[in-house]
Image (spheres, rainbow, N blue to C red):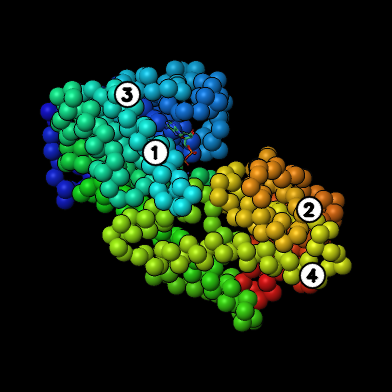
Amino acid sequence: MSRLNGTSPSIPTVDIPDHLATQLTTRTATIGIVGLGYVGLPLAMAYAAEGYDVLGIDVSERIVDQLNRGVNHIEDVDDAELARRVDEEAFRAEATYASIGEADVVFVCVPTPVTQHKDPDTTYIEQATAAMARHLRPGQLLILKSTTYPDTTEGVVQPILEKAGAANGLTLGEDYFLAFSPERVDPGNKEYTTATTPVVVGGVTEACTDVAALALEQIVGTVHRVSSPKVAEMEKLLENIFRSVNIALVNELAQLCDRVGGIDIWEVVEAAETKPFGFMKFTPGPGIGGHCIPIDPYYLSWLARKYDFETSFITLAARINEEMPFYVADAVMRAVAHLPVALSDARVLLLGVSFKPNVADTRHSPAERVLQVLRKRGVTNVSYTDPHVPAYKVQVNGSAEELPRLPLTPEVLEQHDVAIVLTDHTAFDYEMIAAHAPMIVDTRNALRDIPCAEDKLVVLGSGSF
Ligand SMILES: NC(=O)c1ccc[n+]([C@@H]2O[C@H](COP(=O)([O-])OP(=O)(O)OC[C@H]3O[C@@H](n4cnc5c(N)ncnc54)[C@H](O)[C@@H]3O)[C@@H](O)[C@H]2O)c1
């Protein structure tokens, strides 16, 4: 057994098995990554870059087939790097769990959606754990990375592993290990990468924390240990709910500014930002999107309900944010009312349908809700333009439909009655938009520095909305 120095000296380190420690520090460990999406694939590349053999497992045969041909599907991953890792045989992907027993460390990076009733759906985590349990052997470590409610690691994952462990005479914390370490990847963020973003880890025993921290330290500069998986699970939810609540606050103030008139929320935020302490900038928008912020708060409010506790802040924030697409659609209707065109004939162009700038991710993007509301109110002719999203499938009236995609040109802008800036991609030519769109609804203040006739521009939170 080895004694390892932890990165948080306040928490003592304990013995972990020599062979696993040696495998990790000599890069002879095999790293298994279950779920090869936005979280899993960059993680796989980070370990492969450090010289580990990486086995990726994903239930999507299409993704597995593509990856094994060196074809990348995640923007943050470098195409050439993936192809090189496949060529070097440092990375391979499989669509079944048959080889999971080869992995010394298994990261679980599967989706954690909500059900129709907005309750947590941990079935993907359970499937991945059950598969690992079937192949459990001494010296293995499972690190759950999927965002989830506190007690998932100990209440859902641990019993599945322990049942298998007990059947094989293996003891958790001695023969095999379990920890939770939330993911902080911010797709599209060039400043903070896997290596430069500190991570948090909490194991079910001290030895579990130690061995998980050791595994993470091989690719991350700073690993912060906490006393349990529950603390790490709650910490991740705090991060995301912090964003949800602050976005809701500024969205509410934007609506108030519109109501009052003469106060521009963007100028207010810019002024508040001059305070060097105690304030963090958040900006209004057409709603929240992505796989995390719209979903994760529900994981915590579900847990709270089990304890007869109501998470009022979280619920209120979610409500305000979820109402924003309706607010934006109302502004579009008013903009159309000023034009010599009937609602049913109005042509609307959505500028940007991904949930944030400069990425391709459209999951839970407010664009879909804005479209649904417009359709419901009789605006049938809606198209989109987005340099990052080659095709956009949306649910309208219960069926999937592919929204027409158009290039962003002066002619296309002129052929539409209203252009709505939903996502402020850097690649958009805002001067061209200002010059050629007959009417612009700007939910991101993207045209702030662009000369534009006042009577054809309405900006969220500026009083003109
Ligand atoms: N995307 C982000 O920016 C981000 C950031 C932090 C945390 N997270 C969390 O990380 C987790 C994964 O998110 P993501 O964005 O990478 O999702 P994703 O949809 O991009 O990737 C998940 C992958 O898992 C695969 N999969 C589904 N079920 C599986 C199973 N049973 N076994 C193996 N593979 C399976 C899917 O085919 C998919 O390729 C979620 O809990 C999410 O909340 C995401």
**Tag 2: Cα neighbours inside 10 Å, few (<14), some, or many (≥20)?**
some
Name the amino acid type tagged 2: Asn
Q: Residue 293: x, y in percent?
A: 47, 54
Q: Quadrant of ligand 1?
A: top left
Name the amino acid type tagged 1: Thr
Q: Residue 317: x, y in percent?
A: 46, 65
Q: Single out the mark in the foreground, 1 or 3.
A: 1
Q: Residue 198: x, y in percent?
A: 35, 47
Secondary structure category for the residue under label 2: strand
Marks 4/1: CA distance?
47 Å
Which residue is nearer to you in this view: 375 or 188?
Answer: 375
Q: Single out the mark in the foreground, 2 or 3.
A: 2
Tell me the residue that label 2 is attached to. 381
Image position of 303 (left or right of 321): left
The first of marks 1 and 3 along the sequence is 3
User: Is residue 372 shown to the viewer in this render?
Assistant: yes
Residue for point 42% across, 22% down: 96
Tell me the residue that label 1 is attached to. 123
Task: Give the number of the disc on residue 346.
Answer: none
Marks 1/3: CA distance?
22 Å
Residue for point 85% across, 64% down: 341
Marks 2/3: CA distance?
52 Å
The first of marks 4 and 3 along the sequence is 3
Marks 2/4: CA distance?
15 Å
Q: Single out the mark in the foreground, 4 or 1.
A: 1
Task: Give the number of the disc on residue 337.
Answer: 4
